């Protein structure tokens, strides 16, 4: 199976974070993303699942969090076997705007250049490492979300890429090529890969770090990165290929309501998901109402009262 024809790019990135209020305020008010869905972690309904994205939750713009404060989860350690940095894409002339904005919000940041792109690196309230990459190639123009103080012309357009760290770059690189990604270029111990149409939203960066410590899951770490395919039929073919041809353990297809998903660990131990573009976030809310109330799948709706009682309220 030629996966480079079916893996279209990134779908979403999901992180374990600390406090729901801090998380909501940071991603919607500081970074200016739209909360397009408020639901619960389908595997732990005492915890919210927040989906932040563009106006309608287009795949490759979606960043999701599980706020696990007071649920007995320790602070994580970022390291090998994890996504260590999540990059968002901003217009090429928006760098000054964002530098001022980070300063005005009391955030310290560093400025670097990676693969030719000016990059602002900072951390979120839980300790996740994020960056903004200014670039002229991002064609995602149709559903950019703006806020009172972030005009569309400066706003985040979606995920740019993720950087994950592995001990054995050769083994992981070989897997990535079998998974459909193509090597674009290297810089220091980083290698840039692209899939589908390439560019922002369709890129990953592998950090080869043979002497690095293994990461530990917990608050302030990325849980997994999801790649996108068109539909369920394609997802099932990809599942069979990964299990049978690549010999990698993989979950059954899971119903995530807004997409169908499979999960597996790549050589290098990073947790990958493959998710369908269908049906998307408009399946249970109109565009104007996205993210304005708690949505539950049918199998949890029957216990709504109990579920709502256990969630910690936060202010919009
Ligand atoms: Zn996911």
Image: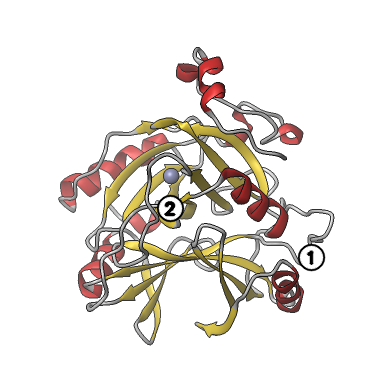
Ligand 1 is located in which of the four quadrants? top left
Q: Position of residue 8 (x, y in %)?
A: 46, 54
Residue at left offset 64%, top offset 54%: 27
Tell which tag, 1 or 2, sits nearer the viewer. Answer: 2
Q: Is residue 141 visible?
A: no
Q: Would you say 119 lies left or right of 15 here?
A: right
Q: In the rendered view, would you say 100 is above or below 233?
A: below
Quarter of the picture containing the C terminus is top right
Q: Would you say 62 lies left or right of 93 here?
A: left
* Dot 1 crowding, Cα within 10 Å, few <14, some 14–19, many 20+: some
Q: Would you say 162 lies left or right of 158 here?
A: left
Residue nearest the observer in this picture, 119 or 181: 119
> Which one is earlier in the sequence, the residue at label 1 or at label 2?
1
**Secondary structure of residue under mark 1:** loop
Look at mark 2 in the image and give the residue it sits on.
219
Residue at left offset 55%, top offset 84%: 112
Q: In the rendered view, would you say 44 is above or below 229?
A: above
Q: Which mark is residue 153?
A: 1
Residue nearest the observer in this picture, 137 or 38: 38
* Dot 2 crowding, Cα within 10 Å, few <14, some 14–19, many 20+: many
Label total for image? 2
């Amino acid at each position: 199976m030629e996966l480079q024809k079916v893996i279209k790019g990134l779908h979403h990135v999901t992180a374990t974070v600390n406090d729901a209020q801090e998380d909501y305020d940071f991603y919607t008010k500081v970074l200016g993303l739209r909360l397009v869905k408020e639901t619960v972690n389908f595997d732990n309904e005492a915890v919210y699942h927040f989906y932040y994205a563009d106006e309608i939750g287009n795949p490759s713009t979606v960043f999701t969090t599980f706020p696990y404060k007071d649920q007995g989860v320790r602070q994580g350690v970022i390291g090998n076997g994890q996504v260590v940095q999540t990059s968002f894409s901003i217009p090429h002339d928006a760098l000054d705007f964002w530098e001022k904005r980070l300063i005005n919000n009391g955030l310290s940041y560093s400025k670097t250049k990676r693969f030719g792109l000016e990059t602002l690196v900072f951390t979120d309230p839980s300790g996740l490492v994020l960056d903004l990459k200014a670039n002229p190639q991002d064609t995602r123009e149709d559903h950019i979300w703006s806020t009172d103080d972030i005009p569309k012309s400066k706003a985040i357009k979606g995920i740019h890429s993720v950087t994950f760290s592995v001990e054995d770059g050769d083994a992981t690189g070989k897997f990535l090529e079998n998974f459909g990604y193509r090597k674009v270029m290297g810089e220091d111990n980083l290698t840039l890969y692209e899939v589908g149409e390439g560019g922002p939203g369709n890129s990953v960066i592998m950090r080869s770090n043979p002497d690095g410590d293994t990461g530990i899951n917990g608050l302030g770490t990325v849980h997994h990165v999801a790649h996108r395919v068109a539909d369920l039929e394609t997802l099932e073919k990809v599942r069979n290929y990964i299990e049978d041809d690549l010999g990698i353990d993989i979950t059954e297809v899971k119903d995530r309501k807004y997409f169908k998903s499979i999960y597996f660990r790549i050589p290098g131990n990073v947790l990958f998901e493959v998710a369908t573009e269908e049906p998307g976030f408009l399946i249970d809310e109109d565009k104007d109402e996205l993210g304005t109330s708690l949505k539950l799948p049918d199998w949890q709706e029957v216990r709504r009262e109990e579920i709502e009682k256990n969630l910690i309220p936060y202010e919009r």
